[in-house]
């Protein structure tokens, strides 16, 4: 169990100022717009519109493929670093496509907190709920942004109730909206007693902020029309009675989320949210590892790979491994030990992703994300250290929910296909199983869209047309047990056996009944739907 630290003041200042987080939301809630405003206030981009191009590109599959073609964009958007006041924010992008994938899960293993964006008119939607459950597995602290308050939105209490009930988390308002839809005037910042008024005329302008001396300050009436003011005061009074106050420890424990109301497109409420991330968001946290967890303030450098992006340049089969720094002060050129192979690696060209630019990372601290170009040595789940045999844990691989057989359009090209599929398997884009009997490969994914994406990528990056066809199997389970038990099981169940890209034994079936039978008949065998990446 991870020992979640509170914001220890004794951390070195360079580490203590880092905030590493991801944004979770349902498509269309405003993640791209919010990201763009973050970067704008972080001074990372000069103009609104630069991230939007990416948001739009994602909408349709063909555009998504276009974006994937232009891998430069998607890579620099995978992790973005920018400063906000004295803080360094590292924003890790959860994959854009709406299909839920393992990639999303792994991204969330690399962050210390998540910002949950919901649409004020729609509340908690399905994808948000799914992503939230993943955050919950890791007790990630969550900060909530209720977006699109410039439009007709739901009643504030209704939104808060829905979050509390659907997600089983306490909610505390950090701001309170005044008026709805056309009458939306702005918010009262409950943490700092300020009235923030939205400027509809200029979307990039920072809201007018008026210092107020508490809710009975007559100054409020100068800015808020009487009927809105009385409703607002009544609501805030009720909120204070019914909702919990902001308890920092509960936030860090992931049991309470503060909510800010705003409108990303109007740049409204965004700075308050950023201020909230800075003040209340967690510092870089200890990372789970075997045989011991890694503390951020350890002198020695350690980091782990949570994402690999391959074929950035189809001519050279290069890859970038995204590494979350877990401890120490990394400097460019350092020699680190690649724990899985026990070999030293000189990290000479690490990159840091500063919004639209990639830059050589001269240094990095615990909490930062760096990209390490390599030729395939670095795989998801790998740990880099200054020599100690640590292994980052908690980066699982899930049994795929959809299986299909993949064949090369040209049967003579099946060796090429194997290479391409293995590459995608290592990148974590799919599971690839080679059946013990018969030809072809069985490819497993979590969302149906991924088959199409894979087919297009194999054609684009390897010049290899492929067909995906229905497979006789629908479920995959990893088989573990003593060597004798596994060998005996494999010998007796050949029709169902395959090997994944790491050579591990996998049981394929189409019936839950089969799985139950194995569990009954082979007490020495465990079938499991997840496996730790290592
Ligand atoms: P996503 O990344 O979560 O999918 O959402 P994105 O930011 O792309 O926003 C989805 C749509 O919602 C966009 O409209 C965007 O302009 C709009 N939007 C974002 N924030 C706000 C807000 O605060 N208020 C209002 N009213 N709309 C907002 P679109 O029509 O799909 O694109 P566009 O024509 O605006 O570019």
Image (tube, helix red, strand yellow):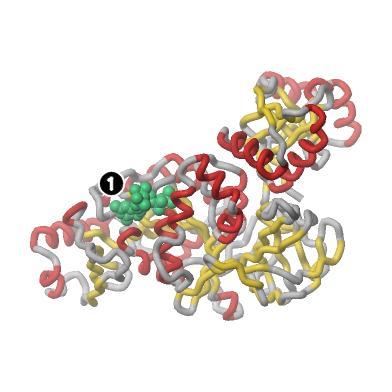
Q: Quadrant of the N terminus?
A: bottom right
Q: Quadrant of residue 284?
A: bottom right
- Please say whether residue 246 is visible from this viewpoint: yes
Question: Residue 36: horizontal and vertical position, in percent?
Answer: 43, 62
- Please say whether residue 90 is visible from this viewpoint: no
Whether residue 354 sits left or right of residue 121 in the image: it is right
Q: Residue at x 59, y 35 (%)?
A: 452
Whether residue 417 sits left or right of residue 97 in the image: it is right
In the picture of the structure, the residue carrying the numbered disc 1 is 158
Disc 1 element: helix
Question: Residue 18: horizontal and vertical position, in percent?
Answer: 55, 72
Q: Which of the pair 403/374 is nearer the observer?
A: 374
The correct choice, above or below, for 465 with respect to 312 in the image is above
Whether residue 178 sits left or right of residue 389 in the image: it is left
Q: Residue at x 48, y 66 (%)?
A: 281
Q: Residue at x 77, y 74 (%)?
A: 334
């Amino acid at each position: 169990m991870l020992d979640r630290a509170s914001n220890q003041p004794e951390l070195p200042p360079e580490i203590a100022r880092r905030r590493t987080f991801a944004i979770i939301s349902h498509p269309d809630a405003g993640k791209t717009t919010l990201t763009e405003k973050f970067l704008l206030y972080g001074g990372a981009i000069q103009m609104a519109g630069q991230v939007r191009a990416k948001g739009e590109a994602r909408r349709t599959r063909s555009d998504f493929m276009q974006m994937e073609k232009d891998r430069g964009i998607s890579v620099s958007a995978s992790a973005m670093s920018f400063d906000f006041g004295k803080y360094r924010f590292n924003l890790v992008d959860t994959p854009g496509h709406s299909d839920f994938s393992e990639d999303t899960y792994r991204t969330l293993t690399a962050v210390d907190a998540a910002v949950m964006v919901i649409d004020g008119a729609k509340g908690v939607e399905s994808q948000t709920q799914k992503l939230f459950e993943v955050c919950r597995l890791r007790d990630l602290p969550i900060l909530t942004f209720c977006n699109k308050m410039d439009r007709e939105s739901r009643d504030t209490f209704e939104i808060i109730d829905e979050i509390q009930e659907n997600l089983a988390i306490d909610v505390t308002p950090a701001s309170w909206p005044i008026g709805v839809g056309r009458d939306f005037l702005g918010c009262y910042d409950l943490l700092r007693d300020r009235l923030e008024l939205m400027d509809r005329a200029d979307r990039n302008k920072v809201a007018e902020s008026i210092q107020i001396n508490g809710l009975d300050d007559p100054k409020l009436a100068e800015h808020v029309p009487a009927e809105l003011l009385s409703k607002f005061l009544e609501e805030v009074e009720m909120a204070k009675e019914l909702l919990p106050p902001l308890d920092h420890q509960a936030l860090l424990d992931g049991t309470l989320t503060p909510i800010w109301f705003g409108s990303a497109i109007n740049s409204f409420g965004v700075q308050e949210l950023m201020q909230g991330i800075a003040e209340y968001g967690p510092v870089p946290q200890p990372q789970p590892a075997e045989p011991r967890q890694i503390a951020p303030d350890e002198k020695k450098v350690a980091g782990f790979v949570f994402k690999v992006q391959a074929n950035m340049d189809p001519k050279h089969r290069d890859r970038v491994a995204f590494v979350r720094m877990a401890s120490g002060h990394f400097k460019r050129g350092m020699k680190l030990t690649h724990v899985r192979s026990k070999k030293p690696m000189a990290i000479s060209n690490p990159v840091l992703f500063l919004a639209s630019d990639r830059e050589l990372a001269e240094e990095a601290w615990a909490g930062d994300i760096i990209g390490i170009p390599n030729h395939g040595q670095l795989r998801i789940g790998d740990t880099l250290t200054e020599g100690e045999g640590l292994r980052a844990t908690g980066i699982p691989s899930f049994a795929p929910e959809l299986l299909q057989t993949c064949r090369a359009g040209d049967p003579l090209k099946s060796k090429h296909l194997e290479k391409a599929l293995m590459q995608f398997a290592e990148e974590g884009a799919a599971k690839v199983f080679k059946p013990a009997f018969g030809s072809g490969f069985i490819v497993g994914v979590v969302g149906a869209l991924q088959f199409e994406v894979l087919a297009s990528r194999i054609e684009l990056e390897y010049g290899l047309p492929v067909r995906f066809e229905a497979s006789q199997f629908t479920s995959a389970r990893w088989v573990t047990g003593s060597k004798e038990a596994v060998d005996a099981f494999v010998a007796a169940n050949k029709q169902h056996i395959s090997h994944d890209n790491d050579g591990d034994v996998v049981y394929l079936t189409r019936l839950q009944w089969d799985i139950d039978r194995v569990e009954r008949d082979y007490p020495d065998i465990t079938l499991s739907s997840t496996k730790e990446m290592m």
